[in-house]
Amino acid sequence: SGAVTAGKLAANSVGADNIKSQSITAEKMKVDSLSSICATIGTLSTSSEGARTVIKDNLIQVYDENNVLRVRIGVW
């Protein structure tokens, strides 16, 4: 089928410099296990308002359904 498998690649032979932007998508991946992904995400929020958790830099904030900050963990 022409597929490239792990057995055909040397360790550390494919890096970000070798991969075309947006060429790897979830539809193209088949993995048995994926333990972690590291990324700089900016701000991650579970909702834009109401009850939500917001993670930004070194800070985690949890708001209740009335937009009241209830928990703040990290550096602010």
Image (cartoon, helix red, strand yellow):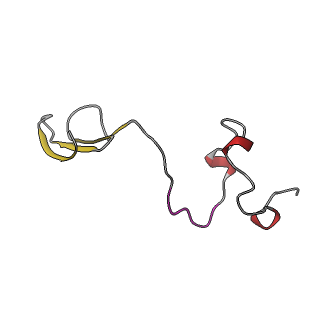
Between residue 69 and residue 28, name the one nearer to us: 69
The percent position of residue 39, horizontal first and vertical second, equals 48, 45
State the residue at coordinates (75%, 56%). Answer: 13
1 left or right, relative to 19: right
| Image position, residue 69 (x, y; %) | 13, 39
32 in the magenta segment: yes
Q: Which residues are magenta?
A: 31-36
Q: Quadrant of the C terminus?
A: top left
Per the image, is 51 magenta?
no
Q: Main secondary structure of the magenta part?
A: loop
Residue at (70%, 40%) from the top-left corner?
23
Quadrant placement of the N terminus:
bottom right
Is residue 1 toward the left or the right of residue 9 in the image?
Answer: right
Quadrant in the rendering for residue 7: bottom right
The quarter holding residue 50 reads top left
Answer above or below: position of 23 versus 13: above
